[in-house]
Protein backbone atom coordinates (compact mmCIF):
# COMPACT_ATOMS: atom_id res chain seq x y z
CA UNK A 1 0.00 0.00 0.00
CA UNK A 2 1.03 3.60 -0.56
CA UNK A 3 1.71 5.98 2.33
CA UNK A 4 -1.65 7.71 1.99
CA UNK A 5 -3.50 4.37 1.83
CA UNK A 6 -1.73 3.28 5.02
CA UNK A 7 -2.62 6.56 6.70
CA UNK A 8 -6.25 6.25 5.57
CA UNK A 9 -6.41 2.73 7.03
CA UNK A 10 -4.89 3.95 10.32
CA UNK A 11 -7.42 6.77 10.62
CA UNK A 12 -10.26 4.45 9.64
CA UNK A 13 -9.27 2.04 12.41
CA UNK A 14 -9.16 4.93 14.88
CA UNK A 15 -12.68 5.96 13.91
CA UNK A 16 -13.87 2.37 14.08
CA UNK A 17 -12.33 1.93 17.53
CA UNK A 18 -14.25 4.95 18.82
CA UNK A 19 -11.28 7.33 19.17
CA UNK A 20 -13.34 9.80 17.12
CA UNK A 21 -17.10 9.69 17.63
CA UNK A 22 -20.05 10.40 15.37
CA UNK A 23 -20.22 14.09 14.33
CA UNK A 24 -16.95 14.83 16.18
CA UNK A 25 -14.34 17.10 14.58
CA UNK A 26 -11.14 15.29 13.65
CA UNK A 27 -7.66 16.83 13.35
CA UNK A 28 -7.07 19.22 10.44
CA UNK A 29 -4.76 18.30 7.59
CA UNK A 30 -1.91 20.29 9.17
CA UNK A 31 -2.51 18.67 12.55
CA UNK A 32 -2.52 15.17 11.00
CA UNK A 33 0.66 16.06 9.12
CA UNK A 34 2.40 16.77 12.42
CA UNK A 35 0.75 13.94 14.40
CA UNK A 36 1.50 11.23 11.83
CA UNK A 37 4.78 12.69 10.52
CA UNK A 38 3.64 12.71 6.91
CA UNK A 39 3.49 15.16 4.02
CA UNK A 40 0.53 17.43 3.43
CA UNK A 41 -0.13 15.62 0.14
CA UNK A 42 -0.30 12.27 1.95
CA UNK A 43 -2.73 13.73 4.48
CA UNK A 44 -4.95 15.18 1.74
CA UNK A 45 -5.07 11.88 -0.17
CA UNK A 46 -5.87 9.92 3.01
CA UNK A 47 -8.73 12.29 3.83
CA UNK A 48 -9.97 11.97 0.25
CA UNK A 49 -10.23 8.19 0.70
CA UNK A 50 -12.08 8.60 4.00
CA UNK A 51 -14.51 11.02 2.34
CA UNK A 52 -15.16 8.66 -0.55
CA UNK A 53 -15.81 5.80 1.85
CA UNK A 54 -18.35 7.92 3.67
CA UNK A 55 -16.48 8.08 6.97
CA UNK A 56 -15.79 11.81 7.20
CA UNK A 57 -17.16 15.00 5.66
CA UNK A 58 -15.75 18.47 5.18
CA UNK A 59 -17.67 21.47 6.55
CA UNK A 60 -16.71 24.88 5.11
CA UNK A 61 -14.75 27.05 7.57
CA UNK A 62 -15.03 24.33 10.24
CA UNK A 63 -12.84 21.41 9.18
CA UNK A 64 -13.42 17.67 8.90
CA UNK A 65 -15.96 15.73 10.94
CA UNK A 66 -16.91 12.10 11.45
CA UNK A 67 -20.16 11.58 9.59
CA UNK A 68 -23.51 10.97 11.24
CA UNK A 69 -24.77 7.37 11.36
CA UNK A 70 -21.16 6.26 11.15
CA UNK A 71 -21.94 2.89 12.75
CA UNK A 72 -24.13 1.96 9.78
CA UNK A 73 -21.46 3.06 7.32
CA UNK A 74 -18.71 1.14 9.08
CA UNK A 75 -20.81 -2.01 9.29
CA UNK A 76 -21.84 -1.99 5.63
CA UNK A 77 -20.20 -2.05 2.20
CA UNK A 78 -18.20 0.90 0.85
CA UNK A 79 -18.49 3.10 -2.21
CA UNK A 80 -15.51 2.92 -4.56
CA UNK A 81 -14.14 5.13 -7.33
CA UNK A 82 -12.70 3.23 -10.30
CA UNK A 83 -10.55 5.20 -12.74
CA UNK A 84 -10.95 2.32 -15.19
CA UNK A 85 -13.34 -0.63 -15.22
CA UNK A 86 -12.22 -4.04 -16.41
CA UNK A 87 -14.32 -7.08 -15.63
CA UNK A 88 -12.17 -10.17 -15.07
CA UNK A 89 -12.10 -12.64 -17.99
CA UNK A 90 -13.35 -15.26 -15.54
CA UNK A 91 -16.71 -13.50 -15.68
CA UNK A 92 -17.26 -14.88 -19.20
CA UNK A 93 -16.63 -18.41 -17.92
CA UNK A 94 -19.10 -17.89 -15.09
CA UNK A 95 -21.69 -16.51 -17.53
CA UNK A 96 -21.34 -19.62 -19.71
CA UNK A 97 -22.00 -21.77 -16.66
CA UNK A 98 -24.96 -19.65 -15.61
CA UNK A 99 -26.52 -19.85 -19.11
CA UNK A 100 -25.92 -23.61 -19.55
CA UNK A 101 -29.10 -24.83 -21.34
CA UNK A 102 -28.61 -28.41 -20.12
CA UNK A 103 -29.26 -27.41 -16.51
CA UNK A 104 -32.21 -25.88 -14.71
CA UNK A 105 -31.96 -22.12 -15.45
CA UNK A 106 -31.50 -20.93 -11.86
CA UNK A 107 -28.63 -18.65 -12.86
CA UNK A 108 -30.19 -16.64 -15.67
CA UNK A 109 -33.00 -14.16 -14.97
CA UNK A 110 -35.15 -15.59 -17.76
CA UNK A 111 -38.68 -17.05 -17.52
CA UNK A 112 -39.22 -20.66 -18.53
CA UNK A 113 -41.14 -21.11 -21.78
CA UNK A 114 -44.39 -21.99 -19.99
CA UNK A 115 -44.55 -18.42 -18.62
CA UNK A 116 -44.26 -16.82 -22.07
CA UNK A 117 -47.14 -16.16 -24.53
CA UNK A 118 -45.38 -18.11 -27.28
CA UNK A 119 -48.46 -19.32 -29.18
CA UNK A 120 -49.84 -15.77 -29.40
CA UNK A 121 -46.40 -14.50 -30.44
CA UNK A 122 -46.16 -17.13 -33.18
CA UNK A 123 -49.58 -16.02 -34.41
CA UNK A 124 -48.23 -12.47 -34.48
CA UNK A 125 -45.30 -13.57 -36.64
CA UNK A 126 -47.66 -15.26 -39.10
CA UNK A 127 -49.63 -12.04 -39.39
CA UNK A 128 -46.40 -10.01 -39.75
CA UNK A 129 -45.40 -12.06 -42.78
CA UNK A 130 -48.56 -10.90 -44.54
CA UNK A 131 -47.70 -7.20 -44.15
CA UNK A 132 -47.04 -5.63 -47.53
CA UNK A 133 -43.73 -3.97 -46.59
CA UNK A 134 -42.50 -6.38 -43.94
CA UNK A 135 -39.38 -7.19 -46.02
CA UNK A 136 -38.19 -3.57 -46.13
CA UNK A 137 -35.89 -1.68 -43.77
CA UNK A 138 -38.46 0.40 -41.90
CA UNK A 139 -37.80 3.47 -39.74
CA UNK A 140 -34.69 3.73 -37.56
CA UNK A 141 -36.90 4.86 -34.66
CA UNK A 142 -38.93 1.66 -35.01
CA UNK A 143 -42.30 0.46 -36.28
CA UNK A 144 -44.82 3.22 -35.61
CA UNK A 145 -47.56 0.93 -34.30
CA UNK A 146 -45.25 -0.67 -31.78
CA UNK A 147 -43.89 2.68 -30.60
CA UNK A 148 -47.46 3.87 -30.07
CA UNK A 149 -48.23 0.80 -27.95
CA UNK A 150 -45.08 1.29 -25.87
CA UNK A 151 -45.91 4.97 -25.39
CA UNK A 152 -49.35 3.94 -24.08
CA UNK A 153 -47.78 1.45 -21.65
CA UNK A 154 -45.21 3.98 -20.40
CA UNK A 155 -47.88 6.65 -19.96
CA UNK A 156 -50.07 4.30 -17.92
CA UNK A 157 -47.07 3.60 -15.73
CA UNK A 158 -46.76 7.25 -14.71
CA UNK A 159 -44.46 8.79 -17.34
CA UNK A 160 -46.52 10.23 -20.23
CA UNK A 161 -44.81 9.90 -23.59
CA UNK A 162 -45.83 10.08 -27.23
CA UNK A 163 -44.55 7.71 -29.91
CA UNK A 164 -42.17 10.48 -31.02
CA UNK A 165 -40.46 10.10 -27.63
CA UNK A 166 -39.75 6.38 -28.21
CA UNK A 167 -36.80 4.69 -29.97
CA UNK A 168 -36.82 0.91 -30.52
CA UNK A 169 -33.57 -0.90 -29.65
CA UNK A 170 -32.08 -4.37 -29.69
CA UNK A 171 -32.97 -5.16 -26.07
CA UNK A 172 -32.54 -3.14 -22.89
CA UNK A 173 -28.74 -3.46 -22.81
CA UNK A 174 -28.48 -1.55 -26.07
CA UNK A 175 -30.92 1.03 -24.67
CA UNK A 176 -28.65 1.62 -21.68
CA UNK A 177 -25.53 1.73 -23.85
CA UNK A 178 -26.90 4.22 -26.39
CA UNK A 179 -28.34 6.45 -23.66
CA UNK A 180 -25.07 6.51 -21.72
CA UNK A 181 -23.03 7.12 -24.86
CA UNK A 182 -25.24 10.09 -25.77
CA UNK A 183 -24.50 12.03 -22.58
CA UNK A 184 -20.88 11.11 -21.74
CA UNK A 185 -17.40 11.16 -23.21
CA UNK A 186 -14.45 8.84 -22.47
CA UNK A 187 -12.95 9.77 -19.10
CA UNK A 188 -16.21 11.08 -17.64
CA UNK A 189 -17.40 9.79 -14.27
CA UNK A 190 -20.74 8.07 -13.72
CA UNK A 191 -22.56 6.71 -10.68
CA UNK A 192 -23.78 3.12 -10.47
CA UNK A 193 -25.60 1.74 -7.40
CA UNK A 194 -24.40 -1.77 -6.61
CA UNK A 195 -25.11 -4.69 -6.80
CA UNK A 196 -26.51 -4.27 -10.29
CA UNK A 197 -26.87 -5.88 -13.71
CA UNK A 198 -23.47 -7.15 -14.89
CA UNK A 199 -23.92 -5.75 -18.41
CA UNK A 200 -23.63 -2.19 -17.08
CA UNK A 201 -19.99 -2.72 -16.12
CA UNK A 202 -19.22 -4.05 -19.59
CA UNK A 203 -20.80 -0.93 -21.11
CA UNK A 204 -18.75 1.31 -18.82
CA UNK A 205 -15.57 -0.54 -19.75
CA UNK A 206 -16.29 -0.21 -23.48
CA UNK A 207 -17.06 3.51 -23.23
CA UNK A 208 -13.90 4.08 -21.13
CA UNK A 209 -15.74 5.81 -18.29
CA UNK A 210 -14.79 6.24 -14.65
CA UNK A 211 -17.22 4.66 -12.23
CA UNK A 212 -18.29 5.27 -8.66
CA UNK A 213 -19.87 2.14 -7.26
CA UNK A 214 -22.42 3.12 -4.59
CA UNK A 215 -23.57 0.19 -2.46
CA UNK A 216 -27.09 -0.49 -1.32
CA UNK A 217 -26.95 -0.56 2.48
CA UNK A 218 -29.02 -2.85 4.67
CA UNK A 219 -32.13 -1.09 6.02
CA UNK A 220 -31.06 2.19 4.34
CA UNK A 221 -31.10 1.32 0.64
CA UNK A 222 -29.35 4.27 -0.99
CA UNK A 223 -27.87 6.85 1.34
CA UNK A 224 -29.06 10.22 -0.04
CA UNK A 225 -26.48 12.26 1.88
CA UNK A 226 -23.75 10.00 0.52
CA UNK A 227 -24.97 10.49 -3.05
CA UNK A 228 -25.13 14.27 -2.58
CA UNK A 229 -21.56 14.33 -1.32
CA UNK A 230 -20.27 12.14 -4.16
CA UNK A 231 -22.07 14.26 -6.77
CA UNK A 232 -20.64 17.52 -5.49
CA UNK A 233 -17.15 16.11 -5.12
CA UNK A 234 -16.78 14.14 -8.36
CA UNK A 235 -19.21 15.97 -10.68
CA UNK A 236 -20.50 12.81 -12.40
CA UNK A 237 -22.09 13.19 -15.82
CA UNK A 238 -24.70 10.46 -15.39
CA UNK A 239 -26.19 7.75 -13.22
CA UNK A 240 -27.53 4.36 -14.29
CA UNK A 241 -30.09 3.15 -11.80
CA UNK A 242 -32.92 0.64 -11.41
CA UNK A 243 -35.39 2.30 -9.05
CA UNK A 244 -38.04 -0.43 -9.28
CA UNK A 245 -36.94 -3.93 -8.20
CA UNK A 246 -33.24 -3.73 -8.85
CA UNK A 247 -31.58 -6.78 -10.38
CA UNK A 248 -30.23 -8.68 -8.42
CA UNK A 249 -31.38 -7.64 -4.92
CA UNK A 250 -34.94 -6.55 -5.71
CA UNK A 251 -34.67 -3.13 -4.01
CA UNK A 252 -37.62 -0.79 -4.60
CA UNK A 253 -36.91 2.87 -3.89
CA UNK A 254 -39.76 4.63 -2.11
CA UNK A 255 -41.42 7.80 -3.41
CA UNK A 256 -39.51 10.09 -1.05
CA UNK A 257 -36.15 8.68 -2.13
CA UNK A 258 -37.09 8.94 -5.81
CA UNK A 259 -38.05 12.60 -5.40
CA UNK A 260 -34.86 13.38 -3.47
CA UNK A 261 -32.75 11.71 -6.15
CA UNK A 262 -34.61 13.54 -8.92
CA UNK A 263 -33.93 16.85 -7.15
CA UNK A 264 -30.22 16.03 -6.87
CA UNK A 265 -29.93 15.09 -10.55
CA UNK A 266 -31.80 18.22 -11.53
CA UNK A 267 -29.70 20.61 -9.43
CA UNK A 268 -26.36 18.95 -10.18
CA UNK A 269 -27.11 18.52 -13.92
CA UNK A 270 -26.62 14.75 -13.83
CA UNK A 271 -28.15 12.70 -16.62
CA UNK A 272 -30.55 10.00 -15.47
CA UNK A 273 -30.53 6.64 -17.25
CA UNK A 274 -33.20 4.50 -15.64
CA UNK A 275 -33.40 0.75 -16.23
CA UNK A 276 -37.11 0.02 -15.72
CA UNK A 277 -36.94 -3.57 -16.93
CA UNK A 278 -38.64 -5.01 -13.84
CA UNK A 279 -41.13 -2.27 -13.01
CA UNK A 280 -44.03 -4.19 -14.59
CA UNK A 281 -43.31 -7.20 -12.37
CA UNK A 282 -44.48 -5.66 -9.09
CA UNK A 283 -46.08 -8.02 -6.57
CA UNK A 284 -48.31 -5.43 -4.94
CA UNK A 285 -51.55 -3.86 -6.10
CA UNK A 286 -50.01 -0.82 -7.78
CA UNK A 287 -47.23 -0.45 -10.32
CA UNK A 288 -44.60 1.93 -8.85
CA UNK A 289 -43.84 5.02 -10.91
CA UNK A 290 -40.43 5.17 -12.55
CA UNK A 291 -37.89 7.56 -11.05
CA UNK A 292 -37.82 9.63 -14.24
CA UNK A 293 -41.45 10.64 -13.63
CA UNK A 294 -40.28 12.64 -10.59
CA UNK A 295 -38.02 14.83 -12.77
CA UNK A 296 -39.21 18.27 -13.84
CA UNK A 297 -38.37 19.03 -17.46
CA UNK A 298 -37.25 22.41 -18.78
CA UNK A 299 -34.67 23.75 -21.20
CA UNK A 300 -32.01 23.46 -18.48
CA UNK A 301 -32.88 19.88 -17.47
CA UNK A 302 -30.15 17.26 -17.91
CA UNK A 303 -30.75 14.52 -20.51
CA UNK A 304 -32.96 11.81 -18.98
CA UNK A 305 -33.90 8.39 -20.31
CA UNK A 306 -36.07 5.43 -19.39
CA UNK A 307 -34.99 2.06 -20.80
CA UNK A 308 -36.80 -1.27 -20.88
CA UNK A 309 -37.70 -4.30 -23.01
CA UNK A 310 -40.08 -7.25 -23.36
CA UNK A 311 -37.29 -9.78 -22.64
CA UNK A 312 -38.62 -10.77 -19.21
CA UNK A 313 -42.31 -10.78 -20.09
CA UNK A 314 -42.92 -11.79 -23.73
CA UNK A 315 -39.72 -13.54 -24.90
CA UNK A 316 -35.98 -12.87 -24.44
CA UNK A 317 -35.02 -13.84 -28.00
CA UNK A 318 -37.16 -11.23 -29.74
CA UNK A 319 -34.73 -8.52 -28.55
CA UNK A 320 -37.27 -5.71 -28.55
CA UNK A 321 -36.21 -2.93 -26.20
CA UNK A 322 -36.78 0.80 -26.18
CA UNK A 323 -35.59 4.18 -24.96
CA UNK A 324 -38.02 6.86 -23.85
CA UNK A 325 -36.92 10.48 -23.45
CA UNK A 326 -38.63 13.85 -23.42
CA UNK A 327 -35.50 15.89 -24.07
CA UNK A 328 -32.69 13.88 -25.68
CA UNK A 329 -34.01 11.29 -28.13
CA UNK A 330 -32.56 13.08 -31.19
CA UNK A 331 -29.03 12.71 -29.82
CA UNK A 332 -29.56 9.00 -29.19
CA UNK A 333 -31.05 8.50 -32.68
CA UNK A 334 -28.00 10.12 -34.25
CA UNK A 335 -25.69 7.70 -32.43
CA UNK A 336 -27.91 4.72 -33.26
CA UNK A 337 -27.74 5.60 -36.95
CA UNK A 338 -23.98 5.07 -36.87
CA UNK A 339 -24.57 1.39 -36.00
CA UNK A 340 -27.65 0.49 -38.04
CA UNK A 341 -30.26 1.83 -40.43
CA UNK A 342 -33.21 -0.23 -39.21
CA UNK A 343 -34.45 -2.98 -36.90
CA UNK A 344 -35.94 -6.40 -37.53
CA UNK A 345 -39.29 -5.26 -38.92
CA UNK A 346 -41.18 -8.61 -38.86
CA UNK A 347 -40.36 -9.07 -35.17
CA UNK A 348 -41.54 -5.57 -34.33
CA UNK A 349 -44.79 -6.18 -36.20
CA UNK A 350 -45.28 -9.55 -34.46
CA UNK A 351 -44.95 -7.93 -31.02
CA UNK A 352 -47.29 -5.12 -32.09
CA UNK A 353 -49.88 -7.69 -33.22
CA UNK A 354 -49.59 -9.50 -29.89
CA UNK A 355 -50.10 -6.28 -27.92
CA UNK A 356 -53.01 -5.28 -30.18
CA UNK A 357 -54.91 -8.56 -29.95
CA UNK A 358 -54.17 -9.77 -26.41
CA UNK A 359 -54.28 -8.36 -22.89
CA UNK A 360 -50.69 -7.67 -21.89
CA UNK A 361 -51.86 -6.58 -18.43
CA UNK A 362 -53.66 -9.89 -17.85
CA UNK A 363 -50.48 -11.74 -18.82
CA UNK A 364 -48.45 -9.55 -16.43
CA UNK A 365 -50.87 -10.21 -13.57
CA UNK A 366 -50.33 -13.94 -14.01
CA UNK A 367 -46.54 -13.50 -13.92
CA UNK A 368 -46.74 -11.28 -10.83
CA UNK A 369 -48.79 -13.80 -8.85
CA UNK A 370 -46.53 -16.69 -9.84
CA UNK A 371 -43.23 -14.97 -9.07
CA UNK A 372 -44.50 -13.72 -5.69
CA UNK A 373 -45.67 -17.23 -4.82
CA UNK A 374 -42.41 -18.77 -6.03
CA UNK A 375 -40.38 -16.46 -3.79
CA UNK A 376 -42.07 -17.96 -0.74
CA UNK A 377 -41.51 -21.51 -2.01
CA UNK A 378 -37.85 -20.82 -2.89
CA UNK A 379 -37.16 -19.11 0.44
CA UNK A 380 -38.77 -21.86 2.49
CA UNK A 381 -36.87 -24.62 0.66
CA UNK A 382 -33.53 -22.82 1.00
CA UNK A 383 -33.95 -21.85 4.66
CA UNK A 384 -35.13 -25.32 5.65
CA UNK A 385 -32.18 -27.00 3.93
CA UNK A 386 -29.63 -24.48 5.20
CA UNK A 387 -31.18 -24.44 8.70
CA UNK A 388 -31.60 -20.68 8.49
CA UNK A 389 -28.00 -19.96 7.51
CA UNK A 390 -28.91 -17.87 4.48
CA UNK A 391 -29.86 -14.20 4.77
CA UNK A 392 -32.51 -13.74 2.08
CA UNK A 393 -33.61 -10.26 1.02
CA UNK A 394 -37.38 -9.85 0.70
CA UNK A 395 -38.25 -7.97 -2.52
CA UNK A 396 -41.62 -6.55 -3.57
CA UNK A 397 -41.30 -7.47 -7.22
CA UNK A 398 -39.11 -8.83 -9.98
CA UNK A 399 -38.22 -12.42 -10.74
CA UNK A 400 -35.03 -13.11 -8.76
CA UNK A 401 -34.00 -14.01 -5.21
CA UNK A 402 -30.88 -12.50 -3.60
CA UNK A 403 -29.27 -14.24 -0.64
CA UNK A 404 -26.20 -13.71 1.50
CA UNK A 405 -24.23 -16.81 2.51
CA UNK A 406 -21.24 -17.42 4.77
CA UNK A 407 -18.93 -18.36 1.90
CA UNK A 408 -17.36 -17.28 -1.39
CA UNK A 409 -20.16 -18.07 -3.85
CA UNK A 410 -17.90 -18.13 -6.91
CA UNK A 411 -16.06 -21.06 -5.37
CA UNK A 412 -19.33 -22.53 -4.15
CA UNK A 413 -20.55 -22.49 -7.77
CA UNK A 414 -17.50 -24.50 -8.85
CA UNK A 415 -18.62 -27.19 -6.43
CA UNK A 416 -22.37 -27.15 -7.02
CA UNK A 417 -22.16 -27.23 -10.83
CA UNK A 418 -20.61 -30.70 -10.49
CA UNK A 419 -23.99 -31.67 -9.05
CA UNK A 420 -25.87 -29.89 -11.82
CA UNK A 421 -26.74 -26.85 -9.67
CA UNK A 422 -26.24 -23.43 -11.24
CA UNK A 423 -26.75 -19.95 -9.79
CA UNK A 424 -25.36 -16.47 -10.39
CA UNK A 425 -22.56 -15.66 -7.89
CA UNK A 426 -22.42 -12.20 -6.35
CA UNK A 427 -19.09 -11.30 -7.97
CA UNK A 428 -20.97 -10.70 -11.24
CA UNK A 429 -22.92 -7.76 -9.84
CA UNK A 430 -20.16 -5.37 -8.78
CA UNK A 431 -16.61 -4.29 -9.54
CA UNK A 432 -15.23 -4.05 -6.01
CA UNK A 433 -15.90 -7.68 -5.09
CA UNK A 434 -17.95 -6.77 -2.01
CA UNK A 435 -20.79 -9.14 -2.97
CA UNK A 436 -18.63 -12.29 -3.05
CA UNK A 437 -20.71 -13.95 -0.35
CA UNK A 438 -24.03 -13.41 -2.16
CA UNK A 439 -25.91 -15.32 -4.85
CA UNK A 440 -28.86 -14.74 -7.16
CA UNK A 441 -31.49 -17.29 -8.15
CA UNK A 442 -34.09 -17.19 -10.89
CA UNK A 443 -37.70 -17.41 -9.62
CA UNK A 444 -39.27 -17.80 -13.05
CA UNK A 445 -39.41 -21.60 -13.06
CA UNK A 446 -42.39 -23.90 -12.66
CA UNK A 447 -42.43 -25.35 -9.13
CA UNK A 448 -41.86 -29.10 -9.31
CA UNK A 449 -39.93 -31.86 -7.54
CA UNK A 450 -36.80 -31.23 -9.60
CA UNK A 451 -36.80 -27.55 -8.60
CA UNK A 452 -37.48 -28.34 -4.93
CA UNK A 453 -34.66 -30.92 -4.82
CA UNK A 454 -32.18 -28.55 -6.48
CA UNK A 455 -32.99 -25.77 -3.99
CA UNK A 456 -32.68 -28.21 -1.09
CA UNK A 457 -29.31 -29.49 -2.32
CA UNK A 458 -28.06 -25.92 -2.78
CA UNK A 459 -29.20 -24.92 0.71
CA UNK A 460 -27.48 -27.94 2.28
CA UNK A 461 -24.24 -27.30 0.37
CA UNK A 462 -24.19 -23.61 1.27
CA UNK A 463 -24.89 -24.43 4.91
CA UNK A 464 -21.86 -26.70 5.13
CA UNK A 465 -19.41 -24.13 3.82
CA UNK A 466 -17.69 -21.10 5.26
CA UNK A 467 -14.97 -18.82 4.01
CA UNK A 468 -12.24 -20.82 5.74
CA UNK A 469 -13.14 -23.94 3.74
CA UNK A 470 -11.78 -22.30 0.60
CA UNK A 471 -8.48 -20.95 1.93
CA UNK A 472 -5.58 -22.13 -0.21
Image: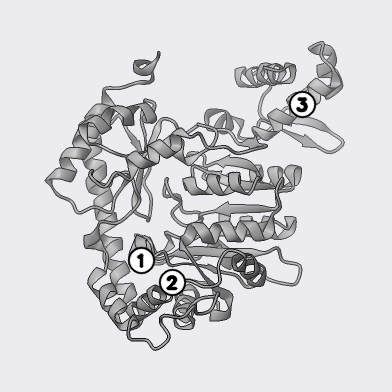
In the rendered view, would you say 140 is above or below 416?
Answer: below
In the rendered image, which residue does mark 2 sit on? 344
Residue depth check, mark 3 versus mark 2: number of the one nearer the observer: 2
**Which residue occupies 60% across, 39% down?**
85
**Which residue occupies 50% across, 34% down?**
88
Q: Position of residue 278 (x, y in %)?
A: 42, 59
Q: Mark 1 or mark 3: which comes first in sequence?
A: 3
Q: How is the image coloured?
A: one colour
In the rendered image, which residue does mark 3 sit on? 45
Q: CA distance from mark 2 to mark 1?
A: 35 Å
In the rendered image, which residue does mark 1 sit on? 285
Left or right: 327 as drawn, with respect to 378: right
Q: Mark 2 or mark 1: which comes first in sequence?
A: 1
Q: Position of residue 424 (x, y in %)?
A: 36, 40
In the rendered view, would you say 162 is above or below 176?
Answer: below
Residue depth check, mark 2 versus mark 1: number of the one nearer the observer: 2
Q: CA distance from mark 3 to mark 2?
A: 52 Å
Q: In this rendering, does residue 86 appear at all?
A: yes
Left or right: 469 as drawn, with respect to 90: left
Amino acid sequence: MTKYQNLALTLKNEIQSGLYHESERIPSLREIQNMKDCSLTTAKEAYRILEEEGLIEAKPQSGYFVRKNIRETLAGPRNHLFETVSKDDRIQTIMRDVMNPKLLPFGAAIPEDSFLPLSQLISGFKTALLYKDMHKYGDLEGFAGLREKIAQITSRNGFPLSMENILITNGCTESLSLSLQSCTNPGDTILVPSPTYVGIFQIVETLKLKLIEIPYRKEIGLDISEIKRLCRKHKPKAIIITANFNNPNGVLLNETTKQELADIFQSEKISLIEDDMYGDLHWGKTRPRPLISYMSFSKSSPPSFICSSFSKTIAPGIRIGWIGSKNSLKTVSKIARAYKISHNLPTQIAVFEYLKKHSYEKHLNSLRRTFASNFLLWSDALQTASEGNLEIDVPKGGLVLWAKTNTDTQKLLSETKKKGIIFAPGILFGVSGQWKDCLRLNLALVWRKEVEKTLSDLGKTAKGKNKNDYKS
